[in-house]
């Protein structure tokens, strides 16, 4: 054993305690007499106590660590009871940090637990950083918690059960007509799309109802650009000043879709994502260019009313997508088998009118096998075109004329970019 190892391990414990202690010092309440447990000196001492107990435990047995830990717990109980007796209102965050700091100190001098010195140093310091980040995150976490509904929590828990318990046990074999379906693949695709959508949904909840319409379009595009189109179309009626801001939200949401689809496809088929790189980015760039013009000429940025987006990780939404994906995948394989490339294009045009993710992932599954990469990429672009046309139709039917004119003109630029970029796919 390195003769300097105990000294270095004790120093590691002090550093870990100092990280936590500095944060507690900064977060100290104004009335320290009532509820201040310790700060930049106390926590390093607690970590050092844990380290010394573990160091003595190497020769005297693990009972030394147990007794030391019990002593710290007893001290915390006495301190907590005394504070509560005075009528102070406080939680147990600092007490929990106290115990974690003690254990980090013990871990720092425990080569039997983590033999490699480098790995032990990394584990102790990274844990201390995580603890410090959690302790300092209260101003950010509490507003977020207030925006999270019970239904959101229940939906996420149900979804995690599906993701961690159900999907890994689904059979990994093909079945159905032409062997088109695979329950394991369908399950993973469902999780992938819902996960991407949840990023946008969580962003909408964190940002709150007073976000600008541009931000609404950005995060809404990760969840449902169709929902954004429906909401903004109705809002544009009766308020001429809102036509440009509402159109900006719709065009931005519809442009984000192409980036999102490209990212999702890359998880499943990197060759297809590479083939789609030029058309997807070209369509997104055309949309972003239109957004830049709209933003510069918008009369006012506009505040967004709460956007009614469904939680994409709810079981109902997830299973709806699973059924849609299974239908699109089976239909695409049948069309390819019996009708060739023309059948694939027809299936893409039809499926794209409802959902772009399903046909994009279906093509990612078939690319390089049942269909060539250029055919699969062209099908995804066609689906994107159909999806854009449908949203343009919604804007025309449901929105004001000024708003619809802006949206349709912007969508025309997107479609033109997509049509021209297909040439890059077939070069």
Image (cartoon, rainbow, N blue to C red):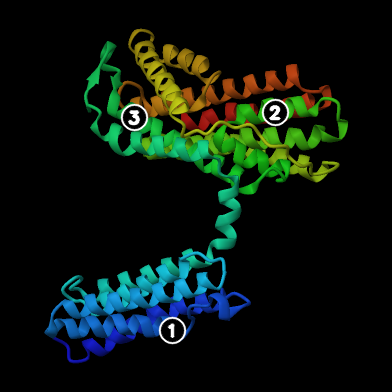
Q: Which mark is residue 215?
A: none
Q: Which mark is residue 42?
A: 1
Residue 86: x percent and y percent? 55, 73
Instruction: Single out the mark in the foreground, 1 or 3.
Output: 1
The crowd level at tag 1 (other Cα within 10 Å; few <14, some 14-19, many 20+) is: some
The crowd level at tag 3 (other Cα within 10 Å; few <14, some 14-19, many 20+) is: many
Label 1: state its secondary structure: helix
Residue at the front extreme, as displayed: 85
Label 3: state its secondary structure: helix
CA gap, disc 1 and disc 3? 50 Å
The answer to whether the residues at label 2 and label 1 have Cβ atoms under 8 Å apart is no
Residue under pointer 2 = 231
Viewer-proximal residue, 389 or 50? Answer: 50
Question: Tag 2 or tag 3, which sits nearer the N-term?
Answer: 3
The residue depicted at 67 percent of the width and 28 percent of the height is 229
Instruction: Single out the mark in the foreground, 2 or 1.
Output: 1
Is residue 269 something one can see in this rendering? no
Would you place residue 281 above or below residue 89 in this image? Answer: above
Quarter that holds the N terminus:
bottom left
The answer to whether the residues at label 1 and label 3 have Cβ atoms under 8 Å apart is no
The residue depicted at 74 percent of the width and 19 percent of the height is 398
Residue at the top extreme, as displayed: 338
Residue at the bottom extreme, as displayed: 3
The residue depicted at 46 percent of the width and 66 percent of the height is 93
Residue 295: x percent and y percent? 77, 43
Give left or right: position of 57 versus 353: left
Residue under pointer 3 = 187
Viewer-proximal residue, 137 or 87? Answer: 87
């Amino acid at each position: 054993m390195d003769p300097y190892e105990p000294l270095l391990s004790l120093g590691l414990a002090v550093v870990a305690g100092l990280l936590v202690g500095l944060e507690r010092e900064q977060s100290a309440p104004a009335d320290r007499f009532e509820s201040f447990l310790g700060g930049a000196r106390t926590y390093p001492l607690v970590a050092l106590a844990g380290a010394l107990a573990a160091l003595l435990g190497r020769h005297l047995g693990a009972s030394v660590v147990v007794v030391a830990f019990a002593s710290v717990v007893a001290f915390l109980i006495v301190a907590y009871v005394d504070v509560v007796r005075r009528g102070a209102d406080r939680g147990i965050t600092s007490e929990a940090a106290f115990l974690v700091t003690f254990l980090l100190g013990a871990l720092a001098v425990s080569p039997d637990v983590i033999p490699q010195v480098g790995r032990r140093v990394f584990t102790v310091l990274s844990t201390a950083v995580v603890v410090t980040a959690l302790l300092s995150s209260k101003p950010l976490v509490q507003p977020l918690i207030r925006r999270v509904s019970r239904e959101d929590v229940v939906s996420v828990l149900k979804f995690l059960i599906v993701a961690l318990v159900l999907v890994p046990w689904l059979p990994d074999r093909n079945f159905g007509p032409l062997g088109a379906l695979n329950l394991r693949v369908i399950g993973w695709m469902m999780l992938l799309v819902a996960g991407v959508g949840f990023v946008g949904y969580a962003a909408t909840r964190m940002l709150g109802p007073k976000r600008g319409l541009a931000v609404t379009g950005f995060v809404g595009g990760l969840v449902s650009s169709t929902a954004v189109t429906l909401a903004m179309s109705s809002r544009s009626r009766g308020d001429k000043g809102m036509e440009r801001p509402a159109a900006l939200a719709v065009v931005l949401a519809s442009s984000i879709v192409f980036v999102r689809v490209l990212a999702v496809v890359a998880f499943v088929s990197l060759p297809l994502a590479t083939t789609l790189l030029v058309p997807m980015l070209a369509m997104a760039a055309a949309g972003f260019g239109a957004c830049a013009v709209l933003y510069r000429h918008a009369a006012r940025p506009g505040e967004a009313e709460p956007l009614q987006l469904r939680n994409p990780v709810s079981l109902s939404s997830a299973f709806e997508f699973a059924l849609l994906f299974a239908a699109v995948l089976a239909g695409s394989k049948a069309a390819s088998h019996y009708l060739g490339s023309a059948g694939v294009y027809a299936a893409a045009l039809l499926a794209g009118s409802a959902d772009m993710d399903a046909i994009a992932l279906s093509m990612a599954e078939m690319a390089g096998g049942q269909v060539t990469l250029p055919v699969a990429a062209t099908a995804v672009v066609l689906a994107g075109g159909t999806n854009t046309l449908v949203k343009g139709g919604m804007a025309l039917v449901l929105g004001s004329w000024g708003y619809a004119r802006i949206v349709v003109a912007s969508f025309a630029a997107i479609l033109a970019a997509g049509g021209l970029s297909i040439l890059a796919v077939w070069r």
